[in-house]
Image: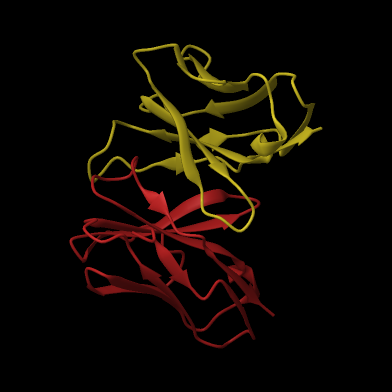
Chain colours: A yellow, B red
């Protein structure tokens, strides 16, 4: 059973508009959440994270929102750029770091930003 | 540092053959992870090592899968015998401190026909 779900396999957005990628989780023990970005033929790279003590974390054009009651998080990219076209993975962990706090990944959402 | 290096980048093999995937972690990293990416299940952790010792292999799907880390700079993931359902992209990652700060290699795309 998928503990981290990304229900949209793909998303297409016009350059300059907002991209919103969604992620749902089922395990209430998760308290640290991350987004990874993956270009074709490359490995995933860390993008942004959020702890459960916050409901928003912002880094430049990227903002992650966490709604703990709904067990939902989202990644907003504003404005979207063609270079943002990639697969985005949501991941969750019960605790930060350490040797035992495994990352559970979603299935990914392919974002295509049209020029 | 060149990052995490995986080889080969692509592997096509016939069902029943043995496949060995290789990984060189970033120098100084104590943790090494093997992940598998599929469309249906996303990125799944197969096994991870700390200081060359396997810590958790509960993600290894079957006994056909095995992994070793004979030294701090090298790890292998072996599938014997391979099956078409093993077709996926396999990633190796390494880190200084656990899961959340891991750096991923470029992956090995395995196709079993």
Q: In this view, does A4 lie to the left or right of A18?
A: left
Observer-nearest of B85 and B42: B42
Image position, residue A18 (x, y; %): 70, 19
Kindly tell me whether residue A95 is visible in this rendering: yes
Quadrant location of the N terminus of chain B in the rendered image: bottom left
Image position, residue A51 (x, y; %): 36, 21
Instruction: Establish if B47 lies above or below B111.
Output: above
Where, by quadrant of the figure, is residue A55 drawn?
Answer: top left
Quadrant location of the C terminus of chain B in the rendered image: bottom right
Image position, residue A75 (x, y; %): 57, 23
* Residue lying at 52% horizontally and 76% vertically, measured from the top left: B8
Instruction: Establish if B16 lies above or below B62.
Output: below
Instruction: Establish if B77 lies above or below B57.
Output: below
Residue furthest to the front: B1
Instruction: Establish if A59 lies above or below B67.
Output: above
Labels in figure, total: 0
Q: In this view, does A64 lie to the left or right of A94?
A: right
* Residue lying at 39% horizontally and 69% vertically, measured from the top left: B23
Observer-nearest of A67 and A46: A46
* Residue lying at 36% horizontally and 24% vertically, measured from the top left: A31
Observer-nearest of B49 and A71: B49
Where, by quadrant of the figure, is residue B104 drawn?
Answer: bottom left
Image position, residue B80 (x, y; %): 47, 83
Q: Is residue A1 left or right of residue A40?
A: left
Kindly tell me whether residue A2 is visible in this rendering: no
């Amino acid at each position: 059973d998928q503990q981290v779900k990304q229900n949209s396999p793909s998303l297409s957005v016009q350059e300059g508009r907002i991209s919103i990628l969604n992620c749902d989780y089922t395990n209430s023990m998760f308290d640290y959440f991350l987004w990874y970005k993956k270009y074709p033929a490359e490995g995933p790279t860390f993008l942004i994270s959020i702890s459960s003590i916050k409901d928003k974390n912002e880094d430049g054009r990227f903002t992650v929102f966490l709604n703990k009651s709904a067990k939902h998080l989202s990644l907003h990219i504003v404005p979207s750029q063609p270079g943002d076209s990639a697969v985005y993975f949501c991941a969750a962990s019960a605790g930060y770091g350490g040797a035992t706090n495994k990352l559970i990944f979603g299935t990914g959402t392919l974002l295509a930003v049209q020029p | 540092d060149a990052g995490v290096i995986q080889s080969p980048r692509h592997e096509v093999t016939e069902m029943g053959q043995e496949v060995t995937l290789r990984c060189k972690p970033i120098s100084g990293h104590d943790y090494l992870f093997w992940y598998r990416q599929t469309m249906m299940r996303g990125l799944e952790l197969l096994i991870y090592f700390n200081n060359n010792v396997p810590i958790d292999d509960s993600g290894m799907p079957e006994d056909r899968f095995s992994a070793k880390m004979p030294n701090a700079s090298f790890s292998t993931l072996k599938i014997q015998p391979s099956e078409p359902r093993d077709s996926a992209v396999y990633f190796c990652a390494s880190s200084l401190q656990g899961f959340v700060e891991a750096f991923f290699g470029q992956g090995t795309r395995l196709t079993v026909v």
